[in-house]
Every structure is written in C-alpha cells, then in structure tokens.
Amino acid sequence: RLRIQAPPATIYGLIQDLHQFNRWNPWLRKEPSAKGEYGGPAAGVGARYGWEGKELGQGSMEIIAEVTARLS
C-alpha cells in the first residue's frame, strides 16, 4: 500500500491529463527518446496517447471513463 501526501485534486490532474501523466510516467523515463503522440481532447474522457520506442515497443492508451470516489 502506498500513501501519497498530496490533495486529491493534485493527483487527479496528474492522471486525467495525459500530458501531465507523462511528467511522472515511469515507462517514459525508461526510454525518454520514445516517440509519443496525443489525440482527442486535452484531458478527460477521450484523451489518447500513443508511443513507439525501441525498448517500450508500440502501444496506446485512452481514458474511457472517469469515476470519482470519496476516500477516507
């Protein structure tokens, strides 16, 4: 289990906006020279990111839903 000492709004912003996600993306850190391409809206449902690299291979991801929950 991991506890992140940050407000939920801060964490949410680093996940729902794929441009911000890539600020901490552990796979992109393995191969910073990998090519990436964004598509769809800037953030939220429909936002897409695709990548291609020698080590990372080729792939893509898309935000297909947003679910909010109250955590205690």
Image: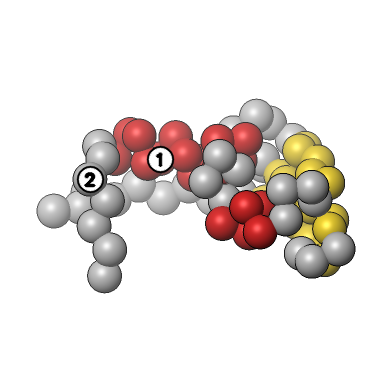
The answer, for residue 64, to whether it is visible in the render is: no
The answer, for residue 14, to whether it is visible in the render is: yes
State the SS at label 1.
Answer: helix
Tell which of 42 and 57 is nearer to you: 57
Give x and y (percent) for residue 35: 83, 46
Q: Earlier in the sequence, mark 2 or mark 1?
A: 2
Give x and y (percent) for residue 14: 47, 39
Give x and y (percent) for residue 33: 79, 47
* Residue on which disc 1 sits: 12
Labelled disc at residue 53: none
In which quarter of the view is residue 42 placed?
top right
Q: What residue sits 52% from the left and 46% below the top? A: 24
* Residue on which disc 2 sits: 5
Position of the N terminus, as image quadrant, is: bottom left
The reply, left or right, for residue 57 in relation to residue 27 is right
Tell which of 16 and 29 is nearer to you: 29
Q: Amino acid at mark 2?
A: Gln
